[in-house]
Amino acid sequence: MNKDLVSIKDLSVPEISGLFDLAAELKKNRKSHEQMLKGHTLGLIFEKPSNRTRVSFEVGMFELGGNSIYLGSEEIRLGKREAVKDAAKVLSRYLDCIVARTFSHARFLEIVKNSDVPVINGLTDLLHPCQALSDIFTIKEKKGLNGITLVFIGDANNVLNSLLYGCGKVGIKMNIASPKGYGPREDILENSACDVKIFDSAEDAVKGADVIYTDVWTSMGQEKEYKKRLRRFKKFQVNSELLNLAKKDAMVMHCLPAHRGEEITDEVLDGKQSIVVDQAENRLHMQKAILVKLLRG
Ligand code: CP
Ligand code: NVA
């Protein structure tokens, strides 16, 4: 693997398979790898809030015998108290690895450029690679990867961009339904190897779905657009009527946190076909695999 995990686009198919195999092994024997990253320290630079990403990386590091330090927006105050490049250069003298969650992807790349230690993308406005890797690992566990169609309903955001790269690598087909003006970016579609169909109706997109995936309509950093987005996306809710149009055994996925009653109803999120909690658990096993691959090779 490269020094850093910036995007799934940069991973080869064997590297992705290697991560899946290692995550499966670490999951099976969860508490028996306490020596793997002994003496290593991970720093988490987070400009935005987090439950899953932060906790899974911190617990993962602990289970592998290492330490972690959380650096929230008030700790180092990137770009305010000191220049991003100064902070990145100094931190990479202390730490063995950095996870960064930034508002802008450009800022994340600036951290990468100025860090001597591996930097992992913990979400930017453009990408969320750790999420998509563990999501595809979850699909593989539940259904295998052959002949799968993943239908994404909603905003073409960071999660969708990483799913497009990831699904393209493993041969999952995608249908995407979004309101006009909120569909996938041309550059991401061009750079992804994914077999994609674009729809303007959620009902048409879900036919034949093995997996229905959705995410919030308003991502972190877009709060000012909340009311407008609520109006624009209202026909793109994942609810029971929509679920009934998919295959009978279709699974429902959401990266969480969910805005219940907006992009997804309680009934579906809490229903039998929802695998969101298994999906969230797998973030832990995948983060551990990523850490081991980057730090131990
Ligand atoms: N899915 C995800 O990344 O969750 P957090 O924002 O809580 O880390
Ligand atoms: N698209 C969401 C994902 C949160 C995990 C956001 O960026 O806020």
Image (cartoon, grey):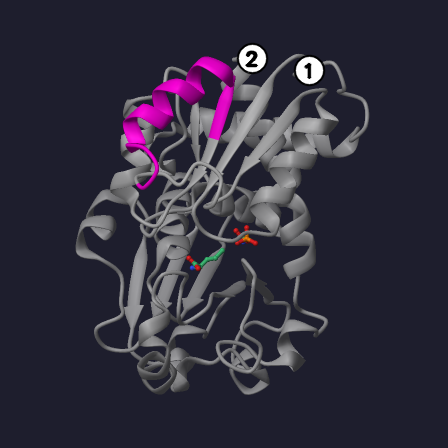
Task: Indicate the quadrant of ligand 2 in the picture.
Answer: bottom left
Secondary element type, mark 1: loop
Viewer-proximal residue among 202 and 157: 157
Are dots 2 and 1 in contact, CB under 8 Å? yes
Q: Relative to residue 149, is residue 23 depicted above or below? A: above
In the rendered image, the residue lying farthest to the front is 81
* Part of the protein shown in magenta: 80-98
Where residue 86 sits, quadrant-wise, is top left
Q: Amino acid at mark 2?
A: Arg
Q: Relative to residue 45, is residue 61 depicted above or below? A: above
Which of the two discs, 2 and 1, labels the residue nearer the N terminus?
A: 1
Is 224 on the left or on the right of 20, as rendered?
Answer: left
Is 272 on the left or on the right of 249, as rendered?
Answer: right
Viewer-proximal residue among 129 and 11: 129
Secondary element type, mark 2: helix
Magenta stretch contains residue 93 = yes
Q: Position of residue 112 (x, y in %)?
A: 33, 27
Q: Amino acid at mark 1?
A: Met
Where residue 255 sits, quadrant-wise, is bottom right
Label 2, residues with CA under 10 Å away: few <14, some 14-19, many ≥20: few
Residue 1 in view in this figure: no
- The residue to which callout 1 is attached is 36
- The residue to which callout 2 is attached is 296
Q: Relative to residue 257, is residue 82 depicted above or below? A: above
